[in-house]
Amino acid sequence: MNYKLFGTNTGLKASEAILGAATFGTRKGYGADREEARKIFHAYVEAGGNFIDTADRYQLGESEELIGQFIGNQRSNFILSTKYTQSAEANPSLSNFGNHRKAMRQGVEASLKRLNTDYIDIYMPHFDDGITPLDEIVRCLEDLVSSGKILYTGVANFPAWKTAVIGNTTRLAANQLEYNLLQRTAERELIPMGNQFGLGTMAYSPLAGGILTGKYRKGETGRINLTADYQENEFTRKIVDRLFILAEELEATPGQVAFAWVLSKNVFPIIGARSVDHVTESIKGLSLQLSPEQLEQLDNLSEISMGYPHDLLATVQG
């Protein structure tokens, strides 16, 4: 596992891949039980990982509880990132839901207890609730930093313009977003904005819910086909076909190739795993080196229209 600075607004040295703990626990009916979650955690740590991402909503708080237990007395050796907005309640009341000061205060206090720690390294709202004034979010996050309960701030799943407004007011450290070969729209605004503000970009779903591993072609089940039938479209088919070809060339798996592509984009991919095999598969992808030609093949197949004004500016600027 290699390490690099988390953005340019911190001196924090983080492992190049983050362990995502959304599946730690089974309270929501789909996830890894305690023993499997422990194996996932130790496999990641043994590979040199030091960065764990979770949220109060994941498994209705069980994810945070398990992380706190697994870390034990090694708290100082890990970077912990967690999020609030939806709360850990199955059916949160209106006063407990959202990004406002009350929800944030209740969220951080509850997360600290579940994680069995007195501080959180990176804390952020999980989604833009579309209601809370941005200034309120900023002031609340700054208060938590001043109190020592959190060290760094960030946002997840926020529009680029709102992140920019917040970033102009306070020094953000992190931006969490979805990014993979099937979802590159973050390249239009979110990733350039993050680079401009020096944010560490945390990219979740690097394997697109398992689609890029090709497992659904084999009839396997996963997050994507739990609630609906999954049908592979032409765009996806071409990309997955190419992943299989490159995997054969590199003596790897399609999932490892897809993971290596995300890693090449100077972001921190979040490993989502429901079994220890899932996490070891992604860890192997860390050492996979794609050639410029192989990267270009994947870039071209997954290319998206940048839209206005980017397409216009590309023409005008030559």
Image (cartoon, rainbow, N blue to C red):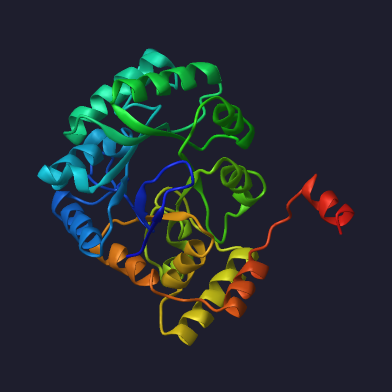
Residue 92 is at least partly visible in this image: no
Which percent across, then down, holds residue 229? 48, 55
Q: Residue at x 50, y 43 (%)?
A: 199
- The correct choice, above or below, for 169 with respect to 244 in the image is above
- The correct choice, above or below, for 222 with respect to 134 in the image is below
Residue 128 is at least partly visible in this image: yes
* Image quadrant where residue 65 sits: top left
Which percent across, then down, holds residue 48? 26, 62
Q: Residue at x 39, y 46 (%)?
A: 11
Quarter of the rendering occupied by the N terminus: bottom left
Q: Residue at x 60, y 35 (%)?
A: 159
Q: Nearer the viewer, residue 222 or 179?
A: 179
* Image quadrant where residue 220 sits: bottom left
Quarter of the rendering occupied by the C terminus: bottom right
Q: Nearer the viewer, residue 128 or 76?
A: 76
- The correct choice, above or below, for 28 with respect to 310 in the image is above
**Relative side of 95 to 7, left or right:** left
Extreme residue in the right direction: 316
**Relative side of 158 to 50, left or right:** right
Which percent across, then down, holds residue 215? 41, 68
Q: Nearer the viewer, residue 264 or 143?
A: 143
Extreme residue in the front direction: 11
Extreme residue in the left direction: 73
Q: Residue at x 56, y 44 (%)?
A: 194
Q: Nearer the viewer, residue 174 or 294?
A: 174
Q: Total number of numbered labels?
A: 0
Which percent across, then down, holds residue 197? 57, 40
